[in-house]
Image (cartoon, rainbow, N blue to C red):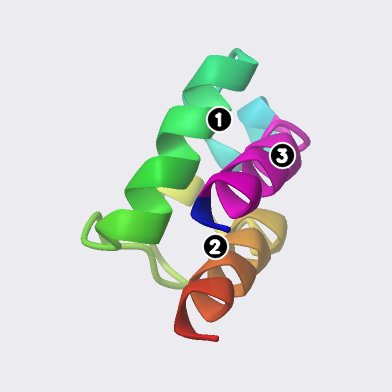
Amino acid sequence: QYILVLFIFAGLYSTVPRETCKTAIFTYFDAFSFSVSVLFTIGFGTNGGDVFFGECAWMQTIITLQVRELLL
C-alpha cells in the first residue's frame, strides 16, 4: 500500500510549479524522493510561511493529503 501512495503522490509533486513554489523537483525521481521524505520523516519543516515553498498552497495541500494517507 505504501508504494502505491508514494507513486501517486510523486506524480502530484511533479505538477507543482517549480519556480512559483521554490521546489527542487526537476524529475519524477526527485518527486518520488520527496514523496518518501514526506511520508516517512515529515521533519523538514513546512508551514504557511516556510521560505522553501514560499506561500505555495498547492505544495502544502499535497503534503497534507499525503500525511493524511499515512494516518488512515
Amino acid beneath label 2:
Ile
Number of other residues with Cα within 10 Å of mark 1, as a class: few under 14, some 14 to 19, many 20 or more: many
Q: Which residues are magenta?
A: 3-17
Q: Which residue occupies the extreme top position in the image?
A: 27
**In-front residue for pair 6/58:** 6
Q: Which residue is mark 2?
A: 63
Number of other residues with Cα within 10 Å of mark 3, as a class: few under 14, some 14 to 19, many 20 or more: some
Closer to viewer: mark 3 or mark 1: 1
Q: How far across and down, in percent of the image, does residue 15 sit?
A: 78, 36
Label of residue 16 in the image: 3
Question: Which image quarter is the C terminus in?
Answer: bottom right
- For residue 18, what is the image quadrant? top right
Element marked by disc 3? loop
Amino acid beneath label 3:
Val
Q: Earlier in the sequence, mark 3 or mark 1?
A: 3
Label of residue 31 in the image: 1
Number of other residues with Cα within 10 Å of mark 2, as a class: few under 14, some 14 to 19, many 20 or more: many
Question: Would residue 14 be visible to someone looking at this image?
Answer: yes
Label of residue 58 in the image: none
Residue 72 as seen in the image, left or right of residue 8: left
Closer to viewer: mark 2 or mark 3: 2
**In-front residue for pair 68/14:** 68
